[in-house]
Amino acid sequence: VPVDGSHWLSMREVLDMLAQKGHEVVVVAPEVTMHIKPSKNFVMKKHSGPLSSQEEMERDFKAFLYSLFEEGSFLERFLKVYKHMKRLGNLAVSSCEHLLQNKELIRYLEESKF
């Protein structure tokens, strides 16, 4: 499951090393991402996801970041962060659902013994 942000940036180095050692690397990612971009070091397969645009993704991510630094009581801040974490978790689950419903991509993965 593709995880954007710092997780991807760390994983990218591992994928580059695997490719340099001769491994065929396939990255499956949603169409809308922050950092997951095509590379000569891997084959990239995209699938539709729950977010319709880059702007929507950036808006959700910024809202989450801002909630981390808002003022208020511990309980108020906790509930705001929890709400945003729940939204991000739901987006991740929805992204997986979109991936699994993509028959063409699943067929490619099965045929290539992914």
Image: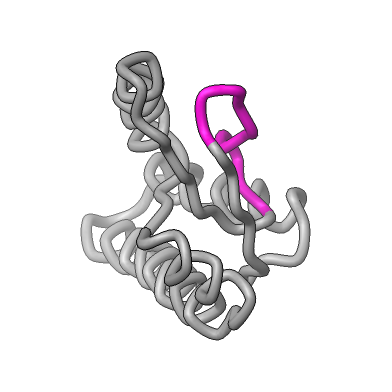
- State the residue in front, 100 or 56: 100
Above or below residue 52? Residue 90 is below
Q: Residue at x 67, y 66 (%)?
A: 51
Above or below residue 65? Residue 101 is below
What colour scheme was applied to this rendering of the protein?
A: one colour
Residues shaded magenta:
32-42
Majority secondary structure of the magenta segment?
A: loop
Q: Position of residue 102 (x, y in %)?
A: 60, 79
Q: Position of residue 114 (x, y in %)?
A: 37, 59
Q: Residue furthest left?
A: 74
Quick check: 59 left or right of 108?
A: right
**Any magenta on residue 37?**
yes
The image quarter in which residue 53 lies:
bottom right
Q: Residue at x 48, y 80 (%)?
A: 100
Q: Position of residue 24 (x, y in %)?
A: 41, 35
**Any magenta on residue 111?**
no
Q: Residue at x 42, y 52 (%)?
A: 2
Quick check: 52 left or right of 71?
A: right
Quarter of the picture containing the N terminus is: bottom left
Above or below residue 60? Residue 38 is above
- State the residue in front, 15 or 33: 15
Q: Position of residue 5 (x, y in %)?
A: 45, 37
